[in-house]
Image (spheres, rainbow, N blue to C red):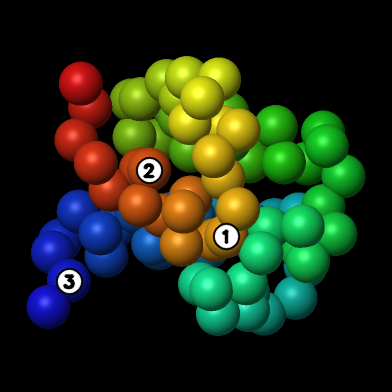
Amino acid sequence: MKNHSSDSSHASVNRCLQKYYGEEIPPSSTPISELHLDSLDLIETLFELEQIHDKTLTNFEIASLCTIEDLVRLFAVPHR
Protein backbone atom coordinates (compact mmCIF):
# COMPACT_ATOMS: atom_id res chain seq x y z
CA MET A 1 0.00 0.00 0.00
CA LYS A 2 1.32 3.45 -0.94
CA ASN A 3 1.57 6.12 1.69
CA HIS A 4 0.22 9.65 1.29
CA SER A 5 3.71 11.11 0.84
CA SER A 6 4.43 8.72 -2.03
CA ASP A 7 1.10 9.49 -3.72
CA SER A 8 1.70 13.21 -3.34
CA SER A 9 5.24 13.04 -4.72
CA HIS A 10 4.08 10.85 -7.62
CA ALA A 11 1.42 13.42 -8.54
CA SER A 12 3.81 16.38 -8.29
CA VAL A 13 6.51 14.58 -10.33
CA ASN A 14 3.96 13.79 -13.04
CA ARG A 15 2.68 17.40 -13.13
CA CYS A 16 6.21 18.79 -13.42
CA LEU A 17 7.29 16.29 -16.08
CA GLN A 18 4.09 16.94 -18.06
CA LYS A 19 5.11 20.58 -18.55
CA TYR A 20 8.24 19.57 -20.44
CA TYR A 21 7.39 16.14 -21.80
CA GLY A 22 4.11 17.23 -23.37
CA GLU A 23 2.67 13.74 -23.66
CA GLU A 24 1.15 11.21 -21.29
CA ILE A 25 3.78 10.32 -18.73
CA PRO A 26 4.96 6.72 -19.22
CA PRO A 27 5.14 4.11 -16.41
CA SER A 28 7.30 4.84 -13.37
CA SER A 29 9.82 2.20 -14.44
CA THR A 30 10.68 4.27 -17.54
CA PRO A 31 14.25 5.57 -17.61
CA ILE A 32 14.38 9.36 -17.40
CA SER A 33 16.63 9.33 -20.48
CA GLU A 34 13.74 7.92 -22.53
CA LEU A 35 11.73 11.08 -21.89
CA HIS A 36 14.18 12.91 -24.18
CA LEU A 37 14.16 16.01 -22.00
CA ASP A 38 17.01 18.39 -22.63
CA SER A 39 19.26 19.16 -19.68
CA LEU A 40 17.61 22.52 -18.99
CA ASP A 41 14.14 20.94 -18.87
CA LEU A 42 15.38 18.33 -16.41
CA ILE A 43 17.06 20.94 -14.19
CA GLU A 44 13.92 23.11 -14.23
CA THR A 45 11.83 20.06 -13.30
CA LEU A 46 14.15 19.23 -10.40
CA PHE A 47 14.19 22.85 -9.22
CA GLU A 48 10.39 23.04 -9.27
CA LEU A 49 10.09 19.77 -7.34
CA GLU A 50 12.62 21.01 -4.78
CA GLN A 51 10.47 24.12 -4.28
CA ILE A 52 7.22 22.14 -3.98
CA HIS A 53 8.66 19.66 -1.47
CA ASP A 54 10.94 22.12 0.36
CA LYS A 55 13.86 19.79 -0.21
CA THR A 56 17.26 20.32 -1.79
CA LEU A 57 18.75 17.34 -3.61
CA THR A 58 22.41 16.57 -3.19
CA ASN A 59 24.67 15.99 -6.19
CA PHE A 60 24.75 12.31 -5.22
CA GLU A 61 20.94 12.11 -5.25
CA ILE A 62 20.74 13.81 -8.64
CA ALA A 63 23.41 11.49 -10.07
CA SER A 64 21.49 8.46 -8.78
CA LEU A 65 18.35 9.28 -10.78
CA CYS A 66 17.66 6.64 -13.40
CA THR A 67 13.89 6.18 -13.61
CA ILE A 68 10.77 8.21 -12.94
CA GLU A 69 10.25 6.04 -9.85
CA ASP A 70 13.67 7.12 -8.53
CA LEU A 71 12.51 10.71 -8.82
CA VAL A 72 9.25 9.95 -7.02
CA ARG A 73 11.10 8.07 -4.28
CA LEU A 74 13.53 10.95 -3.64
CA PHE A 75 10.69 13.39 -3.09
CA ALA A 76 8.61 10.94 -1.02
CA VAL A 77 11.33 10.89 1.64
CA PRO A 78 10.66 13.52 4.31
CA HIS A 79 12.88 16.59 4.36
CA ARG A 80 16.00 15.98 6.42
Does 25 appear above or below 72? below
Q: Secondary structure at mark 1?
A: loop
Is residue 37 toward the left or the right of residue 76 in the image?
right
| Badge 1: residue crowd in 10 Å (few <14, some 14–19, many ≥20) | some
Q: Which mark is residue 5?
A: none
Where is residue 25, by image quadrant? bottom right
| Badge 2: residue crowd in 10 Å (few <14, some 14–19, many ≥20) | some
Amino acid, disc 1: Thr
Where is residue 19, by image quadrant? bottom right
Residue at numbered disc 3: 2
Q: Residue at x 48, y 38 (%)?
A: 49
Separation of residues labelled 3 and 1 (CA atoms) = 18 Å
| Badge 3: residue crowd in 10 Å (few <14, some 14–19, many ≥20) | few
> Residues at badges 3 and 1 in contact (C-beta under 8 Å)?
no
Which sits earlier in the primary sequence, circle 3 or circle 1?
Answer: 3
Q: Can the viewer see residue 8 in this picture?
A: yes
Amino acid, disc 3: Lys
